[in-house]
Image (cartoon, rainbow, N blue to C red):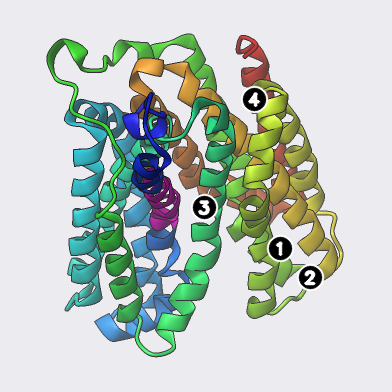
Amino acid sequence: MDAVSRPVAGSSMAEMGPRTLRRRIRVGAVYVGAGLGPLGGGVVSPMLPQIGESLGVSTHTSALSLTVYLVPFAAVQLISGTLGERWGRRNTVLGAYLVFVVGALAAAFAPNITVFLAMRALLGLANGFTSPLLLAGLADIVPRHRLTQSVGIYASCQAAGQSFAPLIGGIAAASSWRWGFVAVAVAAGLLALAPPPGAPRPGAAAPRWRPLLSRPMALLSVAAFVSYFGSASLPFLVALFAQDHLGLRPDVTGVVLLGFGVAGMVLGAVWGMLINKVSARWCGVIGAVVTAGFVAAVGLTGSGWQLTVIWTAAGAAASLLNVAMQNLTMRAVPDNRGGALSVVSAFRFAGGALAPVILLPFYQLQAGLSFVIAASTLVLAIAALLALRAD
């Protein structure tokens, strides 16, 4: 554990003050950093028409900025965590933040769609190095007895970034979409002042790849894939259902969708405390069961308020599953936490990438069936978590 998180024998309160302050700044920077990736990824959602008009392309083409961000983000996480542990968390995250600054500013002043999409891909790549290493760094900053709760707060901050990215993007688009990327660059620059601890681990001390190929890691990867496929990746499907079958306006649909992320933001710390008292494994199972029930029920809703309640409840349960999964993954490979977290996260977002391709044909066949199929995949998460040894 990092020295700043442990009292030193004989230290006076005056001496401990600055150490405590530095630790709190580091912890706060990790929490804020958790929201940077979702913010950078989702900020374009409400500004796609403005981006297309400014760069002389269609909205469909500007929407590729979502894909080119997510693909490198998911792919690089197969190796980013282990590489970051070898290079040192501090150096790696600092470098990724600086790349984020450069990429966001270049996107803000992009003269054409080619440069813009290239910078979006660069931002996704940088986020692939920050997200797992920030979470891994928590274990070196916070006291052991508070780690589970801290993971819950981290998840809340991720949900906050995801929830408020469209709001920030919408505000920027009202004047100029380019200001949204300037804001992202400023945030990344400030975070670069407080990277997480973690020295390089070269030679014999370098984390190994082989432990990442273990049975627990395989089970966690399967659970992560279907947990995202069957819940967090579904806003596009919920939006289609709200407009096609309930007749909701796009702005009202946006409010309906907000509940999923807000529930995770509010309850993340609560779930962390619950897991600390019960069991990450069983909390994950419960979260998967309840999430599956609410996701399947989406297709049965007959009004906007019913959909809002059901989708918000699904977000609350999915948040419990997510916090449990992150806690289990942090303990799966103690000598390479960053590697374990990045691999599982790669599978998680791969599930999100495949969801539209697989589920849209079922939605076009019968809308309610698509939600039942999405919910049924969570049975695999339940089975995988039950197959893990009791924690």
**Residue named by callout 2:** 246
N-term-proximal mark, 4 vs 1: 1
N-term-proximal mark, 4 vs 2: 2
User: Could you tell me if residue 167 is visible in this image?
Assistant: yes
Compared across the picture, whether 154 is left or right of 134 comes to: right
Q: Amino acid at mark 3?
A: Cys
Q: Could you say which disc has been placed on residue 241 in the image?
A: 1
**Residue 390: percent from the left, percent from the top?**
65, 11
Which circle, 1 or 3, is nearer the viewer?
3
Q: Amino acid at mark 4?
A: Ala
N-term-proximal mark, 1 vs 2: 1
Q: Amino acid at mark 2?
A: Leu
Residue extent of the magenta highlight: 23-38
**Residue named by callout 3:** 157
Q: Amino acid at mark 1?
A: Phe
* Depicted 135 relative to depicted 220: above or below: below
Quarter placement of the N terminus? top left
Compared across the picture, whether 293 is left or right of 319 comes to: right
Which circle, 4 or 1, is nearer the viewer?
4
Q: For marks 2 and 3, give the CA distance.
A: 31 Å
Label 4, secondary structure: give it.
helix
User: Quick one: 131 or 250, which is closer to the camera?
Assistant: 131
Q: Could you say which disc has been placed on residue 174 in the image?
A: none
**Residue named by callout 4:** 280
Classify 10 Å Cα crowding around label 4: few (below 14), some (14-19), many (20 and above).
Answer: many
